[in-house]
């Protein structure tokens, strides 16, 4: 007897998410002739760039890198205005792609997947959505994004505050007027830094409640002129090919020179040059900054000295200097006069390491030393990252196993793409890939194309279900942990290791071997004829 629910709608492929991964997945599979439906909680395409509309939001990867390479028409038609694009331009780009490829006709927006269950008998995924619909498809692509589930701070009294609380990760669509207002910001990661340098200049009084100071380097953003764009456009094919062989999935060069291979004065010159050049140039200067603590310490001292030179009040400068964890072990931020903002008379740093927040009160934020009265509070307190979105709804695999049970000690997968026990489910930019450590658009393109090759292979061979073996998944995870072991990234408390969410399993389970090596593993898996997977042959 068939267990198919009568009202279910049958398609070939369900894609969850309309960020850059989901957009490409929908396009790719539709072009290959499949009936694809994309489901997205937001009102339109763009993923994190749809939600993150806070003042100052900007990508710190170069815009020509952080863009699709799969369509030469798109990269030839689109013109980036700045080296590091701001959120409105990135969202405009996502909309341009959606218009150009007519993606919206395949998406259901303002719709959230509430459960996804594998039906072993029917060999299909059955997804329910919050509008009561049921969709069935042999394949389910999870393009849910590594940074999709906002995290409020664990502070008592949030509901008591009388004024508005704005969350960076779900920012209102209308502009907010900060003029003359007393504004308090909690959070000093990439998001909080961008908000500070923007809102700090506009608010009446601006209070930054900083717990852990982040490392940030000058972005030195600039407009892109026509000659540069023309050169990029002429070189896009070679550039995209090079990005696939680069550890960052971008065009930033990679150094093979260890820090101590240069004499001290030359090391200093290289660092001065990197500081003036801006962007992530530091990471391209030396090969061992994330593996040699002594080298890392010297770069950290150099950056701390720079903070001391910029910030006029020595006490504030001291509080802004990160200590106790390696530089680059927390996502390095790029800023535009962030430290200079603290020289403004209306901007005040509240050092919560010395004077912790006790609660949020009706009229402000109370620390151990007293209350700061505020009109507006902003949370820039990060995400339940990497696994949060995949565990935010019920995902049930073979034998009724819940993904959240399988991952109770931390995420385990094969290439960050497939999960043992979850047949025909494919994740893009999944938690055991290079997700946060390389260009997410390059990773998403790789993963979608890998998935399309796999499904194409199955179609040709008359196969209707795949599952990665436990041995292959264990082998991948052993490799992930082997590479993570010596990495300095493990020494910081961050979303990279899951320590920002209470009760979440902690540990570095991202692939730190670089995008190029990751891609080589993906290619080998395909070229080996998918020998790490077991398949079911279609009944004829
Ligand atoms: P985040 O890096 O996780 O930072 C969250 C901040 O909130 C931390 O400073 C944290 O302090 C603070 N916080 C949390 N709970 C707190 C509490 N109870 N009291 C005081 N402080 C508290 O999050 P994010 O800044 O949103 O960045 C997340 C990621 O998004 C980035 O790493 C990056 O990958 C991406 N991003 C990129 C860009 C860009 O391209 N420029 C911009 C924005 C975001 P503790 O560290 O002490 O917990």
Image (cartoon, rainbow, N blue to C red):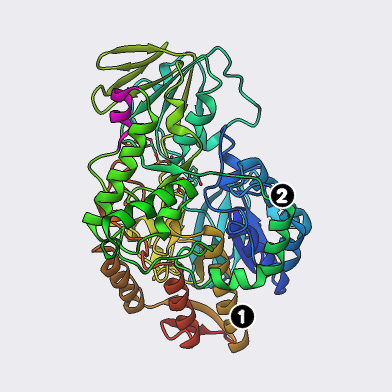
Q: Residue at x 37, y 53 (%)?
A: 269
Secondary structure state at the residue bearing disc 1: helix
Furthest-front residue in view?
265
Residue 340: x %, y % from top left = 45, 29
Residue 504: x %, y % from top left = 30, 47
Q: Residue 247 appears in which quarter of the rendering?
A: bottom left
Q: Residue at x 77, y 59 (%)?
A: 77
Residue that mark 2 sits on:
95
| Quadrant where the image shows the N terminus | bottom right
Residue that mark 1 sits on:
456
Q: Closer to the camera, 311 or 350?
A: 311
Q: Residue 482 appears in which quarter of the rendering?
A: bottom left
Up the image or down, 218 lies above or below 458; here it is above
Residue 119: x %, y % from top left = 50, 67
Q: Closer to the camera, 299 or 98?
A: 299
Numbered label tally = 2
* Distance in Å between CA atoms under marks 2 and 1: 28 Å
User: Magenta region: which residues?
Assistant: 313-321
């Amino acid at each position: 007897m068939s267990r198919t629910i009568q009202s279910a709608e049958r398609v070939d492929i369900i894609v969850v998410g309309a960020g850059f991964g989901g957009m490409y997945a929908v396009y790719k599979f539709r072009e290959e002739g499949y009936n694809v439906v994309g489901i997205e909680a937001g009102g339109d395409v763009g993923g994190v760039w749809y939600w993150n509309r806070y003042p100052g939001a900007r990508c710190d990867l170069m815009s020509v890198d952080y863009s699709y390479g799969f369509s030469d028409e798109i990269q030839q038609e689109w013109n980036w205005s700045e080296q590091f694009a701001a959120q409105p331009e990135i969202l405009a780009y996502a909309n341009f792609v959606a218009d150009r490829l007519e993606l919206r006709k395949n998406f259901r927006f303002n719709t959230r997947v509430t459960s996804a269950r594998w039906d072993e008998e029917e060999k299909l995924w059955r997804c329910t959505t919050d509008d009561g619909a049921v969709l069935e498809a042999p394949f389910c692509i999870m393009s849910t994004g590594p940074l999709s589930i906002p995290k409020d701070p664990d502070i008592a009294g949030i509901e008591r505050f009388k004024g508005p609380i704005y969350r960076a990760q779900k920012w209102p669509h209308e502009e907010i007027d900060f003029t003359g207002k007393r504004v308090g910001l909690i959070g000093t990661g990439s998001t909080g830094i961008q908000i500070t340098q923007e809102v700090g200049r506009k608010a009446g009084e601006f209070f930054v409640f900083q717990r852990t100071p982040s490392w940030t380097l000058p972005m030195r953003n600039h407009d892109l002129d026509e000659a540069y764009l023309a050169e990029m456009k002429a070189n896009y094919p070679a550039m995209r090919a090079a990005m696939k062989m680069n550890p960052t999935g971008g065009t930033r060069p990679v150094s093979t020179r260890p820090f101590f291979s240069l004499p001290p004065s030359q090391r200093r010159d290289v660092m001065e040059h990197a500081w003036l050049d801006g962007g992530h140039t530091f990471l391209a200067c030396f090969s061992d900054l994330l593996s040699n603590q002594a080298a890392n310490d010297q770069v950290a001292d150099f950056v701390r000295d720079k903070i001391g030179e910029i910030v006029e009040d020595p006490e504030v400068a001291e509080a802004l200097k990160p200590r106790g964890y390696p530089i680059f072990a927390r996502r390095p931020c790029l800023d535009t006069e962030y430290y200079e903002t603290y020289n403004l008379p209306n901007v005040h740093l509240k050092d919560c390491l010395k004077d912790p927040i006790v609660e949020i009160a009706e009229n402000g934020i109370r620390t151990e030393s007293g209350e700061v009265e505020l009109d507006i509070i902003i949370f820039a307190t990060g995400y339940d990252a990497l696994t949060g979105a995949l565990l935010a709804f019920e995902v049930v695999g073979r034998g009724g196993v819940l993904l959240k049970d399988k991952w109770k000690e931390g995420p385990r997968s094969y290439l960050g793409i497939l999960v043992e026990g979850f047949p025909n489910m494919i994740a893009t930019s999944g938690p055991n890939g290079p997700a946060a450590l390389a260009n997410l658009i390059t990773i998403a393109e790789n993963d979608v194309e890998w998935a399309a090759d796999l499904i194409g292979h199955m179609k040709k061979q008359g196969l209707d279900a795949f599952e990665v073996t436990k041995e292959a998944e264990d082998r991948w995870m052993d490799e992930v942990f082997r590479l993570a072991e010596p990495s300095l990234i493990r020494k910081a408390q961050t979303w990279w290791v899951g320590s920002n969410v209470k009760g979440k399993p902690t540990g570095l389970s991202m692939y730190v071997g670089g995008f190029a090596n990751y891609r080589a593993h993906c290619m080998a898996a395909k070229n080996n004829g998918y020998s790490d997977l077991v398949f079911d042959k279609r009944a004829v």
